[in-house]
Amino acid sequence: ALSIQAHPNKTLAAKLHREKPQHYKDDNHKPEMTIAVTPFEALCSFQKINSVLENCRACPELVAVVGREAVAGLSAAAEKAAPLTPAWPSARWGRRGATARAGAERNSAKHAAPHSLPDGVSAAEAAARREAVVVPALKRVFTRLMTAEQALVKSQLDALMTRIESTSPMLRLPVDELAARIHAQYPHDVGVFCVYLLNHLVL
């Protein structure tokens, strides 16, 4: 199976060891470093919430697995977090580049001013508030994906591969091509859907 790993920080590692010693054998955080001596690809950390939502809108097969309710909760969390996000407008966050209109929006956004935080709210406080809103919603989506019935995962991956294969190669999106490539190596593995949630890194 495609290996999906989580590396908690020191504080969380100690907590998990106390609560689930059968899974977390000690209280160390075990940081890792990767040095690429050959071309190396990895999926690492979650994409920005707006990017995840954009991928959900363009990938109905993923929504069918995690459920519309979980995606709606993530969308609501994004709206709550938006005023606390000192970043460029959401049009620049998308990773799919699915339409010419989206590309035009990103180009126009290059000259837009970044969002400012509400008066009296520090960057650290805003980050803590965003985390409190976004993390539970994102955790719910990811948990739904990782605990989905294998039969549902298989049927939706088959549907996804059929849709990708029926799309002209010139119109296929990079994230879909990545999903197809991983599926060829790990058929019907739930981890294939992670390309729509995690960052794809090339070292």
Image: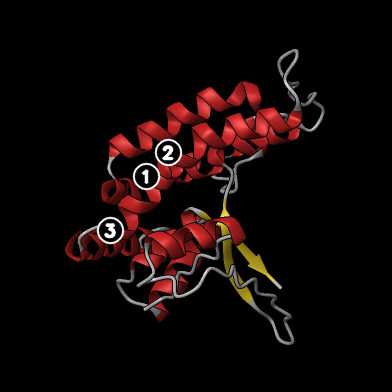
Q: Secondary structure at mark 3?
A: loop
Q: Quadrant of residue 56?
A: top left
| Left or right side of 9 for 106 | right
Q: Which residue is under mark 2?
A: 137
Residue 92 position (above or below residue 183): above
Note whether 67 is above or below 201 in the view shown. Answer: above
How far apart are the alpha carbons under marks 3 and 2?
16 Å
Determine which of the numbered discs, if any, sits on residue 147 in the image.
Answer: 3
State the residue position of label 1. Answer: 140
Nearest to N terminus: mark 1 or mark 3: 1
Quarter of the image holding residue 131? top right
Question: Contact (CB < 8 A) between labels 2 and 1?
Answer: yes
Where's residue 64, x and y in %? 27, 47
Q: Residue at x 47, y 29 (%)?
A: 77
Percent from the top left, x then y, of residue 197? 49, 53
Q: Secondary structure at mark 1?
A: helix
Kind of residue at disc 1? Arg
**Residue at the far front in the pictured view:** 18
Q: Which residue is depicted at the point 61% across and 74% down? A: 41
User: Residue 165: percent from the left, percent from the top?
Assistant: 37, 65
